[in-house]
């Protein structure tokens, strides 16, 4: 079912937590609220679940108003599933009974069949008789997901579900979860502070900052077409190179002149450069000095110093191993030239 928040405001003790939060997750898709601690993302999730009040706005699921300025539908009548950070499994029940626990409205035979189907879907059919303490963290997480999805909720809410797991397990479970949600046709909303998790799981991602939604978009657009400087800083790696926006809209930098992808007034700007915007090219007249490097297997992430002293990043195939202090040729390869008004300071010479 479609989830829609319309101008939702919330406060604790008079201090604003959410400021006119509005976004939509279409039916059968996965959305994500991405933000640092204290940004308001968990509060938003709790409001959708019916666990917190609002001071203004509406929460609508499948065309049904669940929360508005006058009242809210009780959590148990919302038809939602929720997965918490701590899994919240019942220790005295085995895996099968944990999944079957939320299916009390079904006939007993249907409950067992549905629970076994969900355990098969998450790859745990062989562990149905085990208890939570006999499982690894990743297995417990999959049980929690199976239990949340078993009642076929209209909407699944996930509160940083992989926060306690290691990176490799997060990635494998994230992919498994996405495939399961799509197979079930479940609409879902995830909240996380991890952009890698957000990008791997979600169709649409919103960057939340101090209770305000800065951009609700695809991961591609958040990375390549950030709406403002905050989003550009928060999402992905990147550096800002000073330049000048000319009256014709072109932007002049020490790497050359480029047509801007976003509008703006003429004057000093800072151009967002992602590591994949600079290409290693020994034949290029543009030279940069290696300040730092990080080996990433197939690639090396270099921190480079340009002639002006400005630092930029470049991703280079790792078999090109340059020593710190050495020079290498680079050339820009910018598909999107995003520039923001520059703070006071000397602009780079074009």
Image: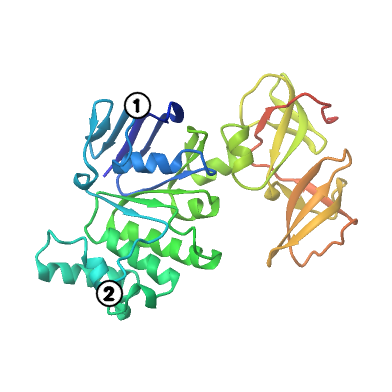
Q: Residue at x 51, y 40 (%)?
A: 38
Q: Indicate left or right for 283 with 53 as reference.
A: right
In primary-sequence order, the first of circles 1 and 2 is 1
> Are the two marked residues, 1 and 2, in contact with CB atoms closer than 8 angstroms?
no
Residue under label 1, please give it: 55
Depth order, front residue of 280/221: 221
Q: Residue at x 62, y 38 (%)?
A: 232
Q: Indicate left or right for 288 with 333 as reference.
A: right
Packing grade of label 2 (10 A; few <14, some 14-19, many >=20) is some
Q: Which residue is at the far left?
A: 107
Q: Indicate left or right for 327 with 17 as reference.
A: right
Q: Indicate left or right for 75 with 202 as reference.
A: left
Packing grade of label 1 (10 A; few <14, some 14-19, many >=20) is some
Depth order, front residue of 277/18: 18
Number of the label disc, if any, that sits on residue 94? 2
Q: Residue at x 50, y 35 (%)?
A: 215
Image x and y of residue 312, in percent: 77, 45
Image x and y of residue 140, in percent: 38, 69
Depth order, front residue of 329/140: 140
Task: Give the vertical position of 103 relative to 23 (above or below).
Answer: below
Spatial CA distance of label 1 from label 2 is 42 Å
The image quadrant where one finds the C terminus is top right
User: Image quarter for residue 201?
Assistant: bottom left
Task: Give the vertical position of 110 relative to 207 (above or below).
Answer: below
User: Image quarter for residue 69?
Assistant: top left
What's the image's color scheme? rainbow
Depth order, front residue of 258/50: 50
Q: Which residue is at the far front?
A: 13
Q: Secondary structure at mark 1?
A: loop
Number of the label disc, if any, that sits on residue 121? none
């Amino acid at each position: 079912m479609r989830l829609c928040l319309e101008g939702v405001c919330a406060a604790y003790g008079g201090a604003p937590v959410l400021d006119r939060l509005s976004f939509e997750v279409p039916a059968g898709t996965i959305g994500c609220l991405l933000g640092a601690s204290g940004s308001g993302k968990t509060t938003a999730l709790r409001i959708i679940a019916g666990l917190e009040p609002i001071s203004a706005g509406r929460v609508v699921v499948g065309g049904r108003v669940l929360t508005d300025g006058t009242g809210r539908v009780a959590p148990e009548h919302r038809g939602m599933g929720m997965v918490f950070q701590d899994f919240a499994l019942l220790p005295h029940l085995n895996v099968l009974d944990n999944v079957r626990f939320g299916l009390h409205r079904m006939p007993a035979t249907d409950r067992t069949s549905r629970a076994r189907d969900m355990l098969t879907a998450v790859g745990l059919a062989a562990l149905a008789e085990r208890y939570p303490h006999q499982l690894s963290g990743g297995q417990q997480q999959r049980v929690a997901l199976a239990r949340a999805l078993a009642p076929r909720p209209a909407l699944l809410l996930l509160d940083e579900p992989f926060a306690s797991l290691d990176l490799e397990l997060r990635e494998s479970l994230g992919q498994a979860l996405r495939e399961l949600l799509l197979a079930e046709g479940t609409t879902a909303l995830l909240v996380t502070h991890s952009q890698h998790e957000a990008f791997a799981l979600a169709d649409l991602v919103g960057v939340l900052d101090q209770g305000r939604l800065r951009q609700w978009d695809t991961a591609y657009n958040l990375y390549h077409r950030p709406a403002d400087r905050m989003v550009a800083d928060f999402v992905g790696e990147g550096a800002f190179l000073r330049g000048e926006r000319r009256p014709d809209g072109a932007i002049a930098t020490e790497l050359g002149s480029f047509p801007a992808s976003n509008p703006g007034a003429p004057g000093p700007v800072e151009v967002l450069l992602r590591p994949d915007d600079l290409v290693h090219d020994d034949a290029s007249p543009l030279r940069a000095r290696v300040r730092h490097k990080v080996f990433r297997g197939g690639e090396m992430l270099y921190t480079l110093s340009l002639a002006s002293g400005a630092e930029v990043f470049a991703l280079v195939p790792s078999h090109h191993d340059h020593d710190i202090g050495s020079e290498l040729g680079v050339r820009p390869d910018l598909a999107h030239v995003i520039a923001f008004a520059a703070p006071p300071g000397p602009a780079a010479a074009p």
